[in-house]
Amino acid sequence: MDVYQRLAQKLDQLPEGFPATGSGVELRILRQIFEPAEAEMALQMSPLPETAEAIAERLGRPVPEMRATLEDMARKGQIASFKMGGQQMYRMAPFVVGIYEFQRRERLTKELAELVEEYMPSLSQKVGGFGPHLTRVIPVNAPLKADLNILPRDDIRQIIAKAKSFRVQDCVCRREQGLLDNRCQHTLHCCLQYSMEEDAYAYFNLDGEVVSREEALRIVEAAEQEGLVHSTYNVEEAPGGFLCNCCPCCCGLLRSLKEFDSPYVLARSSYLASIDQDTCQACGLCKDERCPMDAISEEDGVYRVLAERCLGCGVCAVTCPSDSITLLARPQADRVDIAKNMIDWAQRRLAQREQGQG
Ligand code: SF4
Ligand code: SF4
Ligand code: SF4
């Protein structure tokens, strides 16, 4: 087996998965991203975070040389690097959400975009074929039923209030579709990352910008007006992560749900939209321009939400001219499972894959 085949196998053993295909497109993707020596080094990485010193000791290499190699690979988006407990850590990154999203502007070439598009059906089916869900929808700032308290994990503004560092970068899905001459008109530069660490992006930052809490909130607000769906990791508590603002045309998560039959890529929120028939003006805006999931039906001028398709994103409610759309709590039995934290998520997903032999 060559180094790319070994790396593909190791990436596939991570909870997210990186499936082999008959065409070998996954190997062509890895050849685009890694030089052979970089692929060898990626194979030496642990999926658990380690400092540069710990990796140097484990591999018997001088610390300065090891640090330089790790920084270079992190800058190329080949491994993950982040601040944890005040220290800069490095670990093996999954392909998604990870290596692919980390590809800087100049590294995401048209050729790579074409290969990833070719790989999408196989990748989505593997990543979205096993629970717990990889990511989940967080509702926009939509009206909730009067007696309903939103949980902190479901409130993007509470997550932002608690976090200490923020950065924004281009949305890789829209960039990819742009390279394929297929891009929509939604805002490109609105993919947020947050961390519970102070100055998390001061030492290491890919091609995004560090932003203040106020700017992060402004980006979220603009995304809601624009009709973008918020999503994040499917965990109760995270030391940091992404806050994506997704469009149904380009987003790999929403496309996986709609086009590739991959139910575990993106979980609906704990809410469900409902239309007040007494006040609805039958303007059609929610159905025709806002809902990303075709989850609103119309019959004889009566608009209804299709519960089985509704993501509980609240995008329809933001611009309803008569404030007729409210988010209700989904029945408990109908809610998706949210992992406690990233370790719980990884363990449960590996167990599910083992049972399903994926
Ligand atoms: S998941 Fe959504 S916001 Fe994130 S990169 Fe893709 S479309 Fe952009
Ligand atoms: S946007 Fe509001 S008023 Fe218009 S059809 Fe939808 S629910 Fe009715
Ligand atoms: S009806 Fe559509 S836009 Fe409204 S919450 Fe459900 S999925 Fe979102």
Image (cartoon, helix red, strand yellow):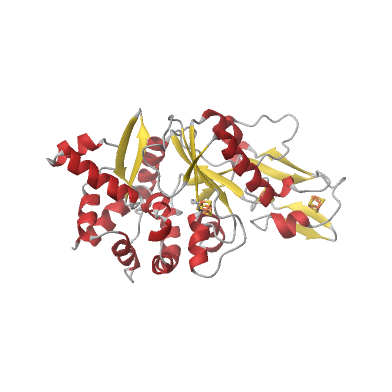
Quadrant position of the C terminus in the picture: bottom left
**Which one is nearer the viewer's eye here, 294 or 308?**
294
Q: Position of residue 317 (x, y in %)?
A: 73, 46
Q: Position of residue 12 (x, y in %)?
A: 32, 54
Identify the residue at the far left of this view: 60
Q: Position of residue 107 (x, y in %)?
A: 38, 60
Q: Is residue 336 visible?
A: yes
Q: Is residue 155 visible?
A: no
Q: In this rendering, would 349 be left or right of 268? A: left
Quadrant position of the N terminus in the picture: bottom left
Q: In this rendering, would 49 be left or right of 352? A: left
**Which one is nearer the viewer's eye here, 200 or 269?**
200
Counting labels gives 0
Residue at 46% across, 37% down = 339
Compared to 166, does 162 lie above or below? above
Q: Position of residue 20 (x, y in %)?
A: 32, 63
Q: In this rendering, would 199 be left or right of 152? A: left
Compared to 216, does 289 lie above or below? below
Residue at 69% across, 48% down = 225
Residue at 65% across, 50% down = 310
**Which one is nearer the viewer's eye here, 226 or 282?**
226
